[in-house]
Image: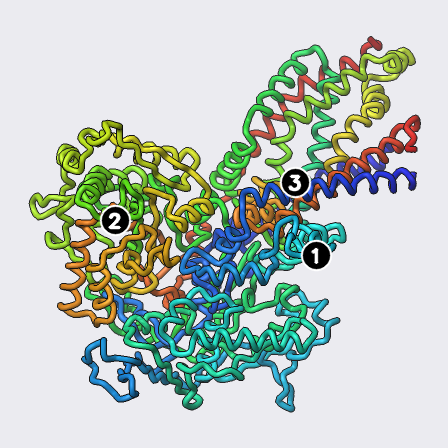
Amino acid sequence: MTAYILRRIIYAMPILLGVNILTFVLFFVVNSPDDMARMNLGMKRVTPAAVENWKHERGYDLPLLFNESATGTGRITETIFFQKSLKLFRFDFGSSDSGRDIGYDISQRMWPSLAIAVPVLLVGLLLNITFALLIAFFRATYIDFWGVVLCVILMSISGLFYIIGGQYLVSKLLHLVPISGYDTGLGSVKFLILPVIIGVIGGIGAGTRWYRTLFLEEINKDYVRTARAKGLSETVVLFRHVLKNAMIPILTGVVVVLPLLFMGSLITESFFGIPGLGSYTIDAINSQDFAIVRSMVFLGSVLYILGLLLTDISYTLVDPRVRLS
Amino acid sequence: MDPNSKQKLSEIARLLPLLAIWLLSACGDGAWNNPYPKADKGRNILYSSFTERPKHLDPVRAYSANEYAFIAQIYEPLLQYHFLKRPYELIPLGAEQVPSPVFLDVNGNRLPDDADPGLIAFSEYKISIKPGMRYQPHPALAQNEQGSYIYHQLDPGFIESANTLSNFPRTGTREVTAADYVYQIKRLAYPRLNSPIAGVMGEYILGFPEFGAASTAAFKQLQASEDGGESWLDLRSIDLEGVEVLDAHRFRVRLRGKYPQFIYWLAMPFFSPMPWEAEAFYSQPGLEKRNISLHWYPLGSGPFMLEENNPNLRMVLAVNPNFHGETYPDTGEPGDRQAGLLDDVGKPLPFIDKASYSLEKESIPYWSKFLQGYYDTSSISSDSFDQAVQFSTQGDLELTEVMEEKGIKLQTAVTTSIFYMGFNMSDPVVGGDLERNHLLRQAISIAMDYEEYISIFNNGRGVAAQGPIPPGIFGNRTGVEGINHQVYEVRNGKPRRKTIEFARRVLAEAGYPNGVDRETGKPLILYYDTTSSGPDGKARLNWIRKQFDKLGIQLVIRSSDYNRFQEKMRKGTGQIFMWGWNADYPDPENFLFMLYGPNGKVKHGGENAANYNNPEFDALFVRMKNMENSPERQEIIDRMVEILRRDAPWAWGFFPKAVSLHHDWYKNVKPNLMANNTLKYKRLEPNLRDRQRRQWNPPVIWPIVIVTVILVVSTIPAVRLFRKRERSAAR
């Protein structure tokens, strides 16, 4: 397995390089270093000298990808791309264009993101699987029919509606939890209740339908018929046999998103005032902070690749027939 | 599952609701939705919010409103605006008195105060600062028993472990000296610090550009001698010709020529004292990388200091224990006493202990929290406008009944800002100085019905502009004499926009009858550059297109992002655009300079985005800017404004109106559009606030109970079905 993991890591390098180049090109097609300087220096009384000074201090006065005025390897190394983007492979995120240490900011802001994402994932998974199993258990009854109808309704509602509606109902009308905000330590619990509930409810429709489909597919297989023939109760058949065999597609969906939980949710964090990585990325895009944007895109890519790798590994754990080689 | 486990599970299940209730009840003072810690109950803390983290808290760079909201409470520039008096009046803050300049000729001989500006070679300001002002406790000033600075030569290992200023346990203070003000002026001139006002100051303060060159050279030399590492350049070692320390509490600033607006700059945080120790401390290698810099941890002598700086979550200002003291003003305008604004005369400032600003990006939760009593003051977004205010039969803004029942108060004020539609004067169609060009722009100015625009898109919050100078600034004329006769006619002493038929006749005179070019026979097509996007933007753009359509002119909208828009303005490739300006200081020069030829954006990179260039106007501007406010100055301004109205480089747009709300417990509220340091005057009644919060936010549990019951009841048929299936034979 070690060889397999090493091979996957090596395969990941050109992907990450490609992602880096793509981010770089897309960013600088839209924003020039002059734009970045002006955005940072403010709207009023920005002189050309101040713009040049800002670019020089941050190394944005170099050519983007190829330096014709340099010689030898300098043609490649004395460029914005080489100086700014390739350091990411050492996980050296450097400083944001406004001077903040990106690594430190990420280490601080990933916790609020996780504080929402982990409970939403775990509680959501538990509820979705439970509901899907129940609906599968009551298949072809009115419970199945109305369950699916409810799921479709839940799926059709915009995530933003859940957030605004939830804030209005729970915080504004019922006064049960703060409408937005965050605090550190145990003080954060009261701020997390509502976003977690909304996150879970918002995901029930799609999750339950997806898992129901998986379970119904399994339920019609021969081993289930055999189990029933042995006289096992329907509950035992569902929870011991069907659930176990449906784990591979479930894992595919779940394990791949595990690392991405760090990246946070853009809308939820913004509406609830949670200082996570989702709002960090949005702020960086709005303020044209290339240093943060490239770091977050790179981190997202690494985590996605890691998620895929973990998914492959998890297959071997739940299905003895799968071997990595 | 064995019976013991089942029993444990059922016990845990029983405890869960209790745990939830305990968690919720721990939320605060009885109101479950209180976002603040229980310990804050009854405390004299002001609660407010910010939407975007401030980028720079260093007074050399900070220039935007969200930065001034913090640093204006922390730093003490030499002057400040009187909190209550109008028109705005400068009074001392760090200085002992408002300085008056001494004028000198080219040989250094003193000239009379009313000397011809042409003879004045230098203006000299001798400034005395208040003795006894002390800096907030700060590690940069911490000294040991031998008098050495404890944290000026940090160990790299220690720096690696430090993440905030609280990692430095020892603090110190010292008296503010004249040398600290001089040090800050040198920082303005130091190019590495990118001060936005370096360009303006470079025109006036003697030796300013030379200091920039010398300090840059010195820094390069320093870097070369220290192997290219980051180094601190002690600016005390380089002289700035126009600034000189006279003694511990006095210094002198010498300007080139006459520049009466200089004293307004002295009221901005750019001219705050900065101890050299701050730079010596923060410039140590590695600290900036740990986010420990002057941009994040200010060092001031004002009434407040930044106690918590987490711009991702919350910023907290606490009272500076070393504050030298100041008292509430004893005079104001007529009506201030009746409004309760003179109830605290002579009392020591500040009144509040802390100000907590929470990051609040979305307007909906922000507004809800204000209504719940968790923010003391609020602006009004367009979403909440109808809920908050309404128009009276006289057309004035007033609170809705719901707001009045809550004891909420309304404050409105026309801001010292302008939004205008500009014509690029270097454009061959809309620009130019020929009569037909004037007439074309005048016709468009009449057609652009800004009264309607304000009503539709600003909820009535604004005043259509008659010229470039906003109300409240010297030079603005009110009443009939202030009316722009090119665009308005006078009816019953009030301005009425000229009819669209009149505008069409003007357009025909310009050579475009019904929007068709008489010479070529082709329809007149104009281009409008904008950054507007989204549904709101689309509605605005449609409205603007409709105004041009009234004249038969086809308007092509060219939308782009702000970067591209700025680029078009810099290159002069735009044709018609809308932009704005917010006053730096209450002087007409700060508005009229945006139409001064040598400030043209394309040729000179200045703020004159219309690239307007009229020699007569420019000559009057040069005369006007050096004058004190007087009838003669007013006369010159009137002539300048008339020239502008005739030439119409701008369709005058509107002056926005600021509307804000505050709760009954929030006292001493008076809009002051020039002062940013008004936090120290604010007073709270925390007990009233606590009572109101409890009254407004009782937890409502019954819907939860009902939903739970419904859920439980609705599962009964499912449970029955489940049991029936379990009992039945395998299918």
What SS does tag 1 mark? loop
What SS does tag 2 mark? loop
Q: Position of residue B547 (x, y in %)?
A: 26, 34
Label at residue A71: 1
Q: Amino acid at mark 2?
A: Pro
Q: CA distance from mark 2 to mark 1?
A: 51 Å
Q: Residue at x 70, y 54 (%)?
A: A77
Q: CA distance from mark 2 to mark 3?
A: 44 Å
Image check: B538 left or right of B11? left
What SS does tag 3 mark? helix
Q: Look at the image and tell me whether residue A325 can be seen.
A: yes
Q: Residue at x 53, y 50 (%)?
A: A287
**Mark 2 and mark 3 on one chain:** no
Q: Which residue is mark 3?
A: A22
Q: From what the image shows, is residue B439 above or below residue B141?
A: above
Q: CA distance from mark 1 to mark 3?
A: 26 Å
Q: Amino acid at mark 1?
A: Thr
Work out which residue is located at the far left of the displayed protein and give it: B492
